[in-house]
Image: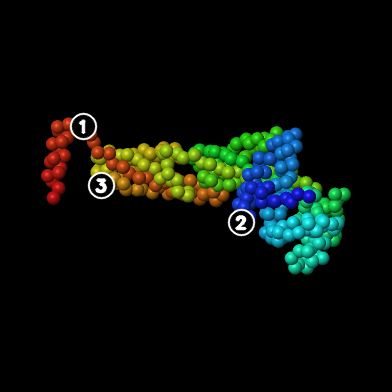
């Protein structure tokens, strides 16, 4: 019987972190899931094999047992792989010192391979199926998907239709979502088995950059160009916000680079109704060009009045 290298099956190193294993499993599961590969027996077998590997490596205790027993597999194989499985052989002194009998129940009784059955079979008790494993409810596969929206859609919230195999579902993205945020849509993953609950859909949101605004958390920053005369004398200018155009007052003697804060004109705070960030307006003063002779003379007169 060929030894199954669960690390190789998932394509991770033996020093991989739990998060790295989880991320890699999700990536492969989306690729090989039967719902996305109807009639593809090779993908179906790959999917089952990955599920077995993740059931072991995705749980710290189970992974520890696998790593501990795995180093003794060759000795077990050379000893004849006699009836009773690895756990019986270990009890008889072949394995490392341990009083625990490892059984399929340690691994939640999933539909694992003959290798796993032989490797971990033993004096387990409990209700079992005809295949020798307990009828444990299994949660459905989690799905992952990508969605790209504009900053305006992130500001207002948006609804999109998403195709999952043959099913189409409506996704509602609440206002205030941020770039890179992951939204969980409960129960929209794969169907559970043996009465287990359905998996979830994890939606990775990308918010496209908007040339009009810079975003930092829930605050926005924009720039407005004003004439020199408005900067010196003060006045009103019209600016664009995600709520529409608004008029703002420019105080007299405003310096270029000065920032004005408009409270409540930024992004909505995600899942916090009534809370909104601020809009910061950076003032840029335009120096007039192509001055007439009269304008130049007047500027010289103004310059002579300054100490």
Instruction: Give coordinates of residue 58: x percent, y percent.
Output: 67, 54
3 or 2: tag closer to the N-terminus: 2
Camera-side mark, 1 or 3: 1
Applied colour scheme = rainbow
1 or 3: tag closer to the N-terminus: 3
Pointer 1 residue = 290
Separation of marks 3 and 2 at Cα, in angstroms: 63 Å
Label pair 1/3, CB-CB below 8 angstroms: no
Pointer 2 residue = 15
Pointer 3 residue = 253
Residue name at image x 70 percent, y 33 percent: 166
- SS label for mark 3: loop
Residue 242 shown left or right of residue 288 in the figure: right
Residue 207 shown left or right of residue 134 in the figure: left
Residue name at image x 56 percent, y 49 percent: 271
Residue 223 shown left or right of residue 178 in the figure: left
Label pair 3/2, CB-CB below 8 angstroms: no
- SS label for mark 1: loop
């Amino acid at each position: 019987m060929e030894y199954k290298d669960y690390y190789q099956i998932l394509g991770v190193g033996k020093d991989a972190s739990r998060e790295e294993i989880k991320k890699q499993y999700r990536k492969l599961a989306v690729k090989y899931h039967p719902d996305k590969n109807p009639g593809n027996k090779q993908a179906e077998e790959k999917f089952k094999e990955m599920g077995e590997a993740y059931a072991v490596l995705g749980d710290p205790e189970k992974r520890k047992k696998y790593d501990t027993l795995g180093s003794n597999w060759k000795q077990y194989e050379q000893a004849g792989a006699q009836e009773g499985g690895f756990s019986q052989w270990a009890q008889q002194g072949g394995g490392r010192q341990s009083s625990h009998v490892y059984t399929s129940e340690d691994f939640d009784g999933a539909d694992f391979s003959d290798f796993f059955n032989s490797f971990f079979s033993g004096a387990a008790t409990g209700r079992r199926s005809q295949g020798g494993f307990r009828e444990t409810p299994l949660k459905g596969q989690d799905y992952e998907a990508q969605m790209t929206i504009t900053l305006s859609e992130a500001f207002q919230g948006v609804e999109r239709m998403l195709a999952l195999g043959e099913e189409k579902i409506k996704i509602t993205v609440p206002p205030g979502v941020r770039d890179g945020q992951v939204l969980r849509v409960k129960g929209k993953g794969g169907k559970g088995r043996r009465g287990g609950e359905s998996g979830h859909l994890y939606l990775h949101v990308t918010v496209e950059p908007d040339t009009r605004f810079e975003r930092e958390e829930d605050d926005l920053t924009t720039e407005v160009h004003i004439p020199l005369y408005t900067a010196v004398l003060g006045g009103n200018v019209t600016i664009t916000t995600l709520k529409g155009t608004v008029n703002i007052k420019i105080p007299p003697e405003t310096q270029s680079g000065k920032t004005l804060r408009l409270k409540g004109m930024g992004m909505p705070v995600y899942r916090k109704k009534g809370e909104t960030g601020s809009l910061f307006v950076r003032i840029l003063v335009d120096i007039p060009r192509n001055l007439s002779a009269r304008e130049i003379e007047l500027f010289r007169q103004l310059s002579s009045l300054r100490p």
